[in-house]
Image (cartoon, rainbow, N blue to C red):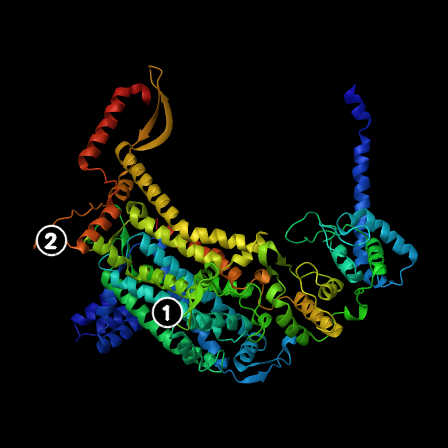
Amino acid sequence: MTSTIERADAHPEAPVPVRKSGGFTAAAANYIEDRTSISGVVKEFGRKIFPDHWSFMLGEVALYSFIVIILTGSFLTFFFQASMVETVYDGSFVPLKGVEMSSAMESTLHISFDLRGGLLIRQIHHWAALLFIAAIGLHMLRVFFTGAFRKPRELNWVIGFLLFVLAMAEGFTGYSLPDDLLSGNGLRIIDGLIKGLPFVGTWISFLLFGGEFPGTDIVGRFYTLHILLLPALVVAFIALHLVFVVVHKHTQFAGAGRTEKNVIGYPILPVYAAKAGGFFFLVFGVIALMAAFFTINPIWNYGPYDPSPVSAGTQPDWYIGFADGALRLIPPGWEFVWLDHTWSFNIIVPVVALLALLGAVAVYPFVEGWVTGDKREHHILDRPRNAPTRTAIGAAGVTFYAALWAAASSDIMATHFQLSIEGVIHVVQAWAVLGPFLAYFITKRVCIGLMKKDHEILLHGYESGRIVRLPGGEYIEVHEPVDEYERWKLLDYEVYQPIMLRPNAEGKITAGMRLRARMSNWFFEDRIAPPTREQLEAGHGHETHGEIEKGPGLV
Amino acid sequence: MARKSRKANRRHPLATVVLIAIGLVVTGGGYALLSSTTTATADTNASSQETIDEGKKLFAANCATCHGMSLEGTDDGPSLIGVGAAAVNFQVGTGRMPMAMQGPQAMQKPPQFTDEQTAAMAAYVASISPGPAIPDEKYLQADGDATNGGELFRINCAMCHNVAGAGGALTEGKFAPELKGVLPTHIFEAMLTGPQNMPVFNDDNLTPEDKRDIITYLKYIENNPSPGGFELGSLGPVAEGLFVWIFGLGAVIALMVWLTAKSN
């Protein structure tokens, strides 16, 4: 089709043969092309090559979930009343009939019980939101552990990180809208967090809630954020994120014929357009099935928000769980009065820890870039084992996050495994502090062990499992050489040397240089270099030499 | 020789098994039949002296080790003076007493006594000193005001038992149990007597009508499953999060692997 358009470009005076060859499609394409010159864009995008690997589709899942969220969210805005005006429920759900509640809660119940398809759409919206953020998280882990954030993609990592934070904000504001008991409790925790900040806390809280908590403004304000400001930002950043993917080209794993200068895979048109289009419906289908069969956020059980009751098992949605868990892990007695102010270190410490964790995620590419001093572009992905220190840092981060996350469900673990809740908390506290170190060392050793194994395979081949007896009576296991394609995968990586500490042009060694040298040493002290050509040849020579020595009796 | 004698006795072990099975079926079936109706007969608290004596014997054999021969309590168990028939009916009727072992709290298990035996012990305990009686049938029909019950439940009960009655954790391994499948009598008695770590909600605090409304609410949510589909244990966001990570994302990743595997 593109070629037809090009021909039309070449002979603008002779449209007749075009119409004859392509009929209506060609004529329509021609019409559009004459008025928009879009063929350049189609040519550029349609020929865009994407490599094939299942983990490259995680970002797509996030994008498709977001589309589902926008579609269902628009439907919900037609019926939701973002108002805290008091009203009396008179809908179909018997145990709430006659209960006073805000019209936000009332309209959410109306959507759930009295609007055709309303509950399904609500549940699709909520399940899609959970999947959206989960997919973003997994996508970030994939990018991190394969080193896809390296130059030139550092800024796109930051954009992705912002999307992750925005998605959490979207999730939290949405969770708070129905003004039910559960979300009200969640808001109260946020209110407490804010008020725990020294000096400014109370002012910020009153500003946010328009007076004393809970007030009558918060649902309306969150609604504006939830459906206007945050989605606009998310859409803008997604667009930017995708533009960068196109500009940078997609990364690929090492393999035969794959270099830093090419991308091997399939073009968008027709392969990926079809695949991705189909995949959208598959993701939509999975979400719709979940929503059709599994209850999510049954606000009718929670009832309207009232500041006095708090239900057992009150938790935020999973993506805020790590913050809730951080609060639960702080031992008692960390607040004191000083200078006529209460200093709530039980709140300040977790808040600082959470911000530090998020900050570390945001700046990691720049830190690693600075440590390696590598200014080259990288389009070939690392296998996680080939960057042991990075992988170990990632594993430590995941372990820390997981500890906070688990702490948020401490009460559920206690009841379901018949444990004491204090015991659970103490174990998770130890896990949060010691776990990251343990994870770091274990992961690093495992990575290095795997690299050694690869090294061995490259030099001496696979253990084939075939045991052979030699004429002399000796038993040996035959090693098969690794095939060419596999060899690419194992061989195509590079190792960095630790930076040597040398005086700069002025003959000085600054503190920054010292730190960098120390970091570099930490990163690259333990390393397994890929075998050199000589080693490989020697290894194979040895292999064939052995074969000859073993003689014909082998085969 | 030994083998032969074992052979000769072969039928006996089998016969025992059959006998136990029949016995279990009869008592179990009988219990199932009675349990729906008998709480009313437990009301025959007018308890003849015969029943009280029967209860006294059962008490001496099964309870007195910890609670003392005359209900005065020991180091291992509290005094039962003044707990009333309601407490006995709840503790023994739900299998919490006799306790299997000392622990953070008495665990529910299949009841060890028949309803008659339970009633006899209740009558005996009530005869020693007055206390809350087994509730009147009219409060147990789950026919009150579910709205009022729901509000009272959220204010008074949900902080331990969870809004949907799914249960929750307390300190030091104690917990508030799930309320699904609990008999109305037992719910009423629990509120009235405050077993284990539960506070007492006496009739001045929650009137019998309020208690009836709470039972009505609990039975409503038990008998009307969620319109949204499977409830995932009514545990809230933790269960939802686990579900989306394992099954939601799991399904999507399976699809991704399938989509990209085709190209090879």
Is residue B242 in view from this perspective?
yes
Q: Amino acid at mark 2?
A: Lys
For the residues labelled 1 and 2, the Cα–Cα distance comes to 44 Å
Is residue B245 in view from this perspective?
no
Q: Is residue A115 above or below residue B222?
A: below
Chain letter of the residue beneath label 2 in the structure image:
A
Q: Is residue A255 above or below residue A93?
A: above
Q: Nearer the viewer, residue A292 or B101?
A: B101
**Residue A512 image point, x, y percent:** 19, 56
For the point 32% across and 48% down, which residue is it?
A384
Q: Write down the quadrant of residue B11 in the picture.
A: top right
- Which numbered dot is residue A508? 2
Q: Amino acid at mark 1?
A: Leu
- Which numbered dot is residue B169? none
Decide if residue A156 is on the left or right side of residue A395: left
For the point 35% across and 44% down, which residue is it?
A441
Mark in front: 1 vs 2: 2
Q: Write down the quadrant of residue A243 in the picture.
A: bottom left
Quarter of the image containing the C terminus of chain A? top left
| Mark sitting earlier along the chain (1/2) | 1
Residue marked by disc 1: A166
Label 1: which secondary element: helix
Q: Residue furthest left?
A: A506
Q: Write down the quadrant of residue B194 in the picture.
A: bottom right
Decide if residue A424 is on the left or right side of residue A60: right
Mark 1 surroundings: few (<14), some (14-19) or many (≥20) residues within 10 A: some
Q: Nearer the viewer, residue B135 or A92?
A: B135
Q: Is residue A335 above or below residue A264?
A: below
Chain letter of the residue beneath label 1 in the structure image:
A
For the point 35% across and 31% down, which residue is it?
A464
Q: Residue furthest right?
A: B49
Label 2: which secondary element: loop
